[in-house]
Amino acid sequence: MILAQMADPQVGFYDYEPELQRLRKAIGRLNKSDCEAVIVCGDMMHIVTRDSLKIFLKEMEQLKKPVFYVIGNHDVISNPESLAAYTELIGPRFYAADLPDPTYRLIALDTFLWMDEPDSAACAEMDQFLLKELADAESAGKKIIIATHSAVFQEDPDEAEIYFNLPIPRRKWLLDLLKKYQVSALLSGHSHRAFTYTLNGTLFSSAETTSVAFDGVCHGFRRFVFKDGMIRFNTISVDTDPIA
């Protein structure tokens, strides 16, 4: 199975037109790629309204691959209408779906609930949803990929809490679940920094972005190959022309 991971398209973060052009270039390269589906790890636009989200979705209509969207913090809190616009035009805050290889199950989660609304009814509902989906996937013999917006951690599982990682109690709870259910990969964004780690058999990937790259590495997306128990990935840059 070959998947693409995009993170933080976030058009309008710093310079609207170049960010829009990089998104278009990524869509063009995805269409020419062998990727079977695309997972977008949150923050579709910098300021999410119904009108801005329609602009984003009109661009994404050019993508000739199945797309799985993950809600980000800008999709929730840009303004009072952002969450309603997102759920109306894109879909639910958390969900599960089979991937092109149906032996893999994708679980998409809303990390904003864990970070800013931990005592809400919606957060409790998502927790129960996650536990059930993990158990059901295990019972069905499926491999599991989790997609979030915020990374579980940036550099160390025991690092201090910051804007870009999960609260420590929630982090430990989730890491225990990833280990228990042998989750294959957790894909995220939010930090605008690209990194990859493995811990207890789970691959943690924060992808490159087509908006602002805080690490200065490159703009682009990631291509993952899942085969024979191995996971390989490479970065597809939109800053340069493809190498033959």
Image: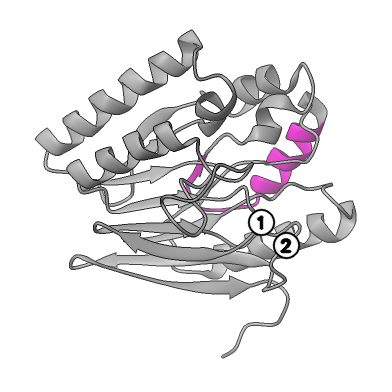
Query: Which quadrant: the C terminus?
Result: bottom right
Residue 44 x, y percent position in the rendering: 68, 41
Front residue of this view, candidates 123 and 29: 123
Compared with 17, 168 (above or below) is above
Q: Quarter of the image holding residue 238?
A: bottom right
Number of marks = 2
Give the magenta part as a residue range. 52-69
From the viewer's perspective, is residue 189 above or below residue 25?
Answer: above
In the rendered image, residue 139, in percent from the top left (x then y), is placed at 10, 34
Q: Percent from the top left, x then y, of residue 196? A: 45, 65
Mark 2 burial class by Cα count in 10 Å: few <14, some 14-19, many 20+: few
Q: In percent of the image, x 26 and y 38: which residue is there?
A: 177
Quarter containing the N terminus: bottom left
Q: Is residue 112 left or right of residue 179?
A: right
Three-letter residue code for mark 1: His
Q: Which residue is denoted by mark 1 in the rendering?
A: 192
| Res 182 seen here | yes
Residue 29 covered by magenta stretch:
no
